[in-house]
Image: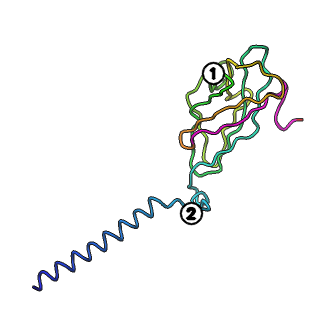
């Protein structure tokens, strides 16, 4: 009888330990730094993206246009811009310019606690096949698709050819 009682105690202790460890693993897997994003303060946390300074210089009649913007990441995890599309254009591609060439790229990194800047003379968007000819003040919807964050839609204004953000 004493052997059976010892076995039950050992089995019960094992079951309690397994439950405690399983519950702890569940909390670790589901916990993400709390509602205040505390994980980001310690350098962790998901990417938190926003878009600023977006514009398209007025393209020549019927021509392709370049698009520029800045994607800011306030989160502790990086992300990648992997696709750009628009209901107002048949094609939007990502390009990188160097001193002598322009090459299409498949993805662009958005670093943790950093930014991806698409600007004149560097990384930019090429917009082709406009549904209607743009005029100054029009806004083109761009759908930016990221590996982790998903898709963010932004309205990008068409500006004069000489426009530069922050310089009025």
Residue drawn at x 62%, y 24% as measured from the top left? 93
Q: Is residue 63 above or below residue 112?
A: above
Say which of 50 and 74 sits in front.
Answer: 50
Is residue 62 shown in magenta? no
Residue drawn at x 19%, y 78% as measured from the top left? 8
| Magenta-tinted stretch | 150-167
Q: Is residue 11 left or right of residue 57?
A: left
Q: Is residue 129 left or right of residue 23?
A: right
Single out the residue that lies furthest toward the left: 1
Q: Is residue 109 above or below residue 135?
A: below
**Separation of disc 1 and disc 2 at Cα?**
40 Å
Single out the residue that lies furthest toward the bottom: 2
**Percent from the top left, x then y, of residue 70?**
71, 38
| Quarter assignment of residue 9 | bottom left
**Percent from the top left, x then y, of residue 75?**
61, 51
Residue matched to label 1: 91
């Amino acid at each position: 009888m004493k052997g059976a009682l010892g076995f039950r105690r050992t089995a019960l202790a094992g079951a309690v330990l397994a439950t405690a460890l399983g519950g702890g693993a569940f909390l670790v897997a589901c916990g993400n730094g709390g509602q205040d994003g505390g994980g980001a303060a310690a350098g962790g946390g998901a990417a938190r993206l926003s878009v600023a300074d977006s514009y398209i210089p007025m393209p020549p009649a019927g021509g392709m246009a370049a698009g520029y913007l800045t994607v800011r990441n306030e989160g502790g995890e990086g992300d990648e811009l992997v696709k750009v599309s628009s209901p107002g254009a048949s094609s939007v591609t990502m390009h990188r310019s160097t001193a002598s060439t322009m090459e299409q790229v498949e993805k662009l990194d958005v670093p943790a606690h950093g930014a991806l800047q698409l600007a004149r003379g560097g990384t930019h968007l090429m917009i082709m096949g406009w549904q209607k000819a743009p005029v100054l003040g029009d806004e083109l919807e761009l759908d930016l698709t990221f590996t982790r964050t998903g898709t963010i839609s932004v309205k990008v204004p068409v500006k004069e050819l000489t426009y530069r953000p922050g310089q009025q």
